[in-house]
Image (spheres, coloured by chain):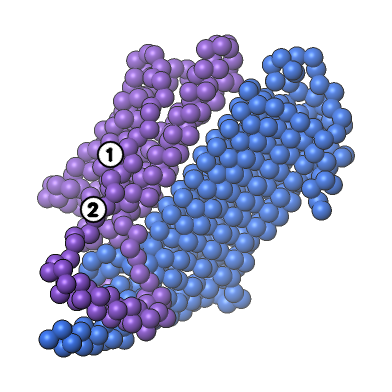
Chain colours: A blue, B purple
Amino acid sequence: MVGRRFAIALAFLLCAAAAEAAEFDRTVSVPRGTRLDVRLYAGQVVVRAWDRDAVRVRATHFTSDEIDLRTIGRAIAVRAHARRGTPHGIDFEIDVPAWMAVDVAGTYLDVAVEGTAADVAAETVRGDVHVKGGAGSLKLKAIDGEVVLEGARGRAELSSTNDGIRVTGFTGEIIADTVNGSVKLRAIQSISIEVGTFGGDISWEGTISDDGRYQFATHTGGVDVSLDDRVNATVSVRAFEGTFRAAFPVNLPDEASRHRRFSFVLGSGAAHLDLETFGGTISLRPLQMTAR
Amino acid sequence: MNGEDTRVEGGCQGDPWADRLSEYVDGELPARERLAIEEHLAVCAACAAVAQELREVVARAGRMRLDSAPTRDLWPGVRVRLRKPLRLAPLSLPRAGDWRRAAPRLVAAAALVACCAAVAWVVAGRLRPAPAAPPVASAPGQAPSPAGAADRDYETTVAQLRRVVQARLTSDPHVAEVLEKNLAALDVAMADYRDALSKQPGDAHLRRRLIDARDRKLQLLRRAATLTTETGN
């Protein structure tokens, strides 16, 4: 009796395994100016640039899920939903023209965008956002996931509540904020940087432009700034209950030790560098020390 | 295909208007869609309740003042987030690709489980019921409540949002935990700023930082409340 039931269950599972999965693969031509708009519940979306004026969408999904690819106005919209029951995670691979603006949002979703040269917007609740390339407006947000931006230019608005933010090789303006994550900025060319976190550290390696303003503020974390020895900046430090360290000679005013709030000038003092921590450590070091 | 329906489908299956409620409350829907959603709200108690809650929160946030003028208006940031509602549900999400790749192993595992279950059933007579899902993490100690009617209004708004979020995140304890952890970090920061302000009451920068932290907390809660609007919990 038990053996028969087991055989039936096994046969059912085998049939289910064969029947459940389906492939989605569709390519549509797009005129210049069209944008990609993806809204998904869960899974992974990888968007890559290619050299065709067309969008190709590939996915493996359960037959109980339905994928919808359509043109709405000047957007190619990608959606998926379950015909019944709990929605599944679906992994998408999408090829787009490099000029195409990309907008991806989801709940349990990992997002990767590679090689585009246009606006990118990505938002997820649980999942990472990785963007390599992109130009123009770059809005990347996650609640519980890392936000990574590489090799882009334009204006970046980056937010991750519970995880870190990393930016490498970026040219343009950056606004980055997180609650419990750290923010790492490397090889940045910018005249406007505003970074805030409450529980994380902030680290910066990049060029300080004479006409730039750079603001780094954390509550319990540290601020680690590596500076070129030719830097021209007025440095404002607020350490509240924290500490300040510099790996090169800095003339500190007398009130510095009492109030832990002071400023000093490097070079001509042209740029503005605001460093703040409530309870952590602010460290200044020469760029050479970190460029090993 | 769903005609012109392009919305994200998810945790609230079969309710095409669920993710448009925040736009409706914000008055951002075209007249045609607004009329359609109003017809829907007349017959859908769940959506009507959510819409009402959103209206109350919006109204409260609009009335709210802090103990000194904020450096920027809170509402636009919240409003932007309301435009992209997302959904939360349990993270038991198999993927078809995973299934296909893992099917032989899964079948073998299922067979093993079936055998074990059968043996256990024979031996014990019945299987022990699965443990209940863990409760949502309770809120950590609140930061000291600042004085003043405006602050009380802020705390009331925060408490209201907390209730909404906690009620709706029962299906995802992980996100609830993450939210509480981050709210706690903000509470710690606010307590530190208040303490520092008590020693240096004239420090405008500290005051601005306190307002920023409060702003951030409100935004986080509003975002979480909106994200969970369509769970149907």
Q: Amino acid at mark 2?
A: Ala
- Specify whether B214 is left or right of A5: right
Q: Position of residue A224 (x, y in %)?
A: 71, 39
Tell me the residue that label 1 is attached to: B164
Residue B15 vs residue B104, the one in the foreground: B104
Q: Chain of mark 2?
A: B
Residue at figure coordinates x 12%, y 50% from the top left: B43
Using the rendered view, name the quadrant where residue A5 is placed: bottom left
Which dot, 2 or 1, sits closer to the camera? 2
Residue at figure coordinates x 30%, y 65% from the top left: A87
- Specify whether A259 is left or right of B57: right
- Specify whether A254 is left or right of B30: right
Kindly indicate whether the residue at mark 1 contacts the one at mark 2 (C-beta within 8 angstroms): no
Dividing the image into 4 quarters, which one contains the N terminus of chain A? Answer: bottom left
Q: Chain of mark 1?
A: B
Q: Is residue B110 visible?
A: yes
Q: Position of residue A121 (x, y in %)?
A: 51, 55
Q: Position of residue A102 (x, y in %)?
A: 51, 61
Residue B184 vs residue A213, the one in the foreground: B184
Q: Position of residue B29 (x, y in %)?
A: 31, 48
* SS for dot 2: loop
* SS for dot 1: helix
Tell me the residue that label 2 is attached to: B132
Residue A180 vs residue A33, the one in the foreground: A180
Residue at figure coordinates x 17%, y 48% from the top left: B46
Using the rendered view, name the quadrant where residue B17 is placed: bottom left
Using the rendered view, name the quadrant where residue A60 is placed: bottom left
Q: CA distance from mark 2 to mark 1?
A: 22 Å
Extreme residue toward the front, this view: B123
Q: Amino acid at mark 1?
A: Val
